[in-house]
Amino acid sequence: MPRALTWVASGALLLTLVACTRDHGGAVSGARPLVTRYGLGRAASSVEVAVLDIDVAPDGHGLPPGHGTTAEGATLFAQKCASCHAAQGQGMPPMFPALVGRDPKGEGFPFASDWRITRTIGNYWPEATTVFDYVRRAMPHTAPGSLTNAEVYALTAFLLAANQVISKDVILDSASLMHVKMPYHNKFVRDNRRGGNEVK
């Protein structure tokens, strides 16, 4: 039999077998249900959930107790961050981005037209509270989540001061951090989609 006819015959046989395995309702006979439960695991306890539920919203909701200074943050940055982000936060491309820098300054916001411009906390970050959130959850790279709340406040204070967003003598805590306005805050549009038919 020619090869082409062999393929056609094989395809017809396959379609016949699939058709024969379906019942009148269109379901495959003997098929497993879509959801299979194996009886493994257990519900997480409230303590376990609390350990993971540490996100901080842009409006500051979720900020924990604690405080830190720029001086404390500078010491911590040298100990825990500079090996990746360099001594002054200038970064080590291409792996580790710059954290410090206010250029380009002025009214322009040319990032959409020039992808080569370096984005830093000082020139491209909409909310100060989310600096805290990111550092708390993801840094340092070698041991994410290992910093205390006070250490995260101190590092956030150092980074904001290094980017000329706050003064170096500020003691940063939840109340003061919620009042920090980033330089280019008004260049971002909040995503207010909720899902379903409301997605734009």
Image (cartoon, helix red, strand yellow):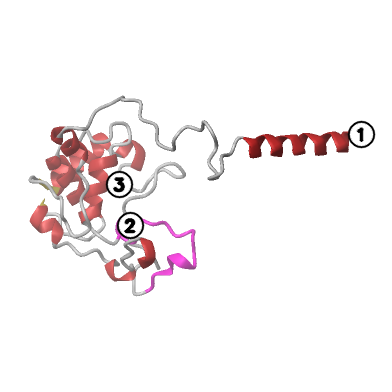
Furthest residue toward right: 2
Is label 2 in a helix, a strand or a loop? loop
Which is more N-terminal, label 3 or label 1? 1
Vertical arrangement, residue 93 with respect to residue 103, above or below: above
As drawn, the label of residue 2 is 1
Which is more N-terminal, label 3 or label 2? 3
- Residue 37 lies, in percent from the top left, at 35, 30
As drawn, the label of residue 101 is 2
Work out whether residue 99 or residue 4 is closer to the camera in this orientation and state it: 4
* Quadrant assignment, res 102: bottom left
* Quadrant assignment, res 184: bottom left
Work out whether residue 60 or residue 114 is closer to the camera in this orientation and state it: 60
In front: label 1 or label 2:
1
Which is more N-terminal, label 2 or label 1? 1
User: Residue 170: in sight, yes or no?
Assistant: no
Residue 124 is left or right of residue 128, and the answer is right
- Is 111 in the magenta? yes
* Quadrant assignment, res 145: top left
What residue is shown at x 35% (from left), y 38% (from top)?
Answer: 84
Vertical arrangement, residue 65 with respect to residue 182, above or below: above
Determine which residue is flagged by label 3.
Answer: 88
> Dot 3: few (<14), some (14–19), or many (≥20) neighbours within 10 Å?
some
User: Residue 149: in sight, yes or no?
Assistant: yes
Which stretch did the figure color magenta? 108-125
Residue 1 is left or right of residue 111, and the answer is right
